Image (cartoon, rainbow, N blue to C red):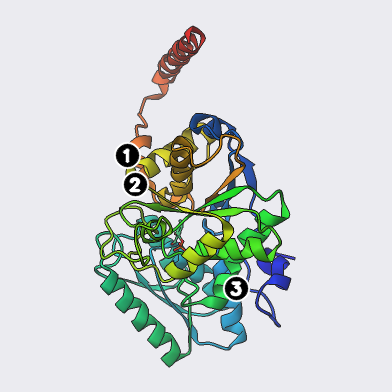
Amino acid sequence: MTGIARHAALLPPVAGEWVTLGEGATPTVALPRLGAAIGLPRLRAKCEHVNPTGSYKDRIAALSLTLACERGQRGWIATSSGNAGTSLGAYGARAGLPGLLFATPTITREKLVPIEAVGTTVVRVADIGTGGSAAAAERVFATVRALAAEHDLFLGVTANALNPDGMRGADTIGHELAEADPPDVVYVPTGGGGLSVCVARGLADAGAAGTRVVVAQPDGCAPIALALDGRLDQPRVERCTTAISGLQLPAPPDGGASVARVRASGGWGSAVADAAILEAQRQLARLEGVFVEPAAATGVAAAAADRAAGRLAADADVVVILTGSGAKDLASAAVWAGGAGDCQPEEVERVAAGWLAGLAGASAEDAAR
Ligand SMILES: Cc1ncc(COP(=O)(O)O)c(C=O)c1O
């Protein structure tokens, strides 16, 4: 069976054909070099960035568009910082259903172009995302919800509060973690809270109730982590100052549900600086060859911080969920990854000699250590 249909027994009933691009069944890989660097030798990653459009949102889009077809709806409507829009657009095109997406103004070119390529109409909305306000985000959610109801459109926003049936597609991450060696702790990059709810529910439904779920957020927008820590009564802040795209939700629609699910799992919240997230992104690439977008590295940064603070034991079996591909936001990595040179054909040997001399120098340094 192709795609998340494999998990149909634990999902809302689907009578007809599934809309699929082969999402899910992503690999869980060991991260030994990064794990050694941050003091967690058993660190592993669930590689959601290898889904068909490069993020875990494909699981949600597969179920959402399958349900939209079953219900005979006219199309879909959603808000997104880019990943959900890319997924809904691709699966919508496959299903023959048009989509209208309201995006954050700072959506990257690598997210925008694929959404438009599949025929989705995209409009950027001011005052949501970086520097955005809780009031603006709540207003846009309410408007989109009303439009969906009025015009028989599938509401594709990736939050349980707005799209409860489609979101169950992301529960399949929890099902897959439960199937193969469930970890002690799973770190979930978190914005609106939906993914953390789905992972916790999926683990519990598939019988792996022993895994603790940790919400990892940037400290410039950490309402759920702060509420879990008892530093906020409600998971809501007025403004968002983090630059980490995908995690910029000051009024997270699934905030309350996330707090409840995470607490029930025995987990906690962890907030880390943007700089630590970008450093985790760099380390994943340099030490493991795994290139993800900044938001996806948030769990790694949080696990490193929690280990340093003694909140995680050195022998903890930790899985980080790598939610989106690095190819979706090249500018954020170009800060540390640029630097290709140019040369003439006759210079190739000289350039290689310089590179080899550098290698010899590095191994002499290693030997001297
Ligand atoms: C790459 C990435 N990671 C994590 C998340 C967070 O998911 P949620 O808003 O369900 O907490 C998102 C959401 O857009 C995302 O794009």
In the rendered image, residue 200, in percent from the top left (x then y), is placed at 58, 61
Look at mark 1 in the image and give the residue it sits on. 335
Does label 3 or label 1 sit earlier along the sequence?
Answer: 3
The residue to which callout 3 is attached is 63
Residue 288 % position (x, y):
54, 35
Task: Give above or below for 348 relative to 142.
Answer: above
Identify the residue at horizontal 58%, vertical 37% (top origin).
Answer: 31
Residue displayed at 59% across by 83% down: 69
Determine the secondary structure under disc 2. helix
**From mark 3 to mark 1, how far is it between C-alphas?**
37 Å
Q: Residues within 10 Å of mark 3 (few under 14, many from 20)?
A: many
- Amino acid carrying mark 2 in the image: Ala
* Residue 23 makes an appearance in the image: no
Asked if the residue under mark 1 is in contact with the one under mark 2, i.e. CB atoms within 8 Å, the reply is yes
Q: Residue at x 35, y 29 (%)?
A: 341
Label 3 to label 2: alpha-carbon separation: 31 Å
Picture coordinates of residue 176 (x, y %)? 67, 57
Which label sits in the foreground, 3 or 2?
3
Name the residue beneath numbered marker 2.
331
Crowding around mark 2 (Cα neighbors within 10 Å: few <14, some 14 to 19, many 20+) is some
Q: Position of residue 303 (x, y in %)?
A: 49, 43
Ligand 1's quadrant: bottom left
Q: Secondary structure at mark 3?
A: helix
Circle 3: residue type: Leu
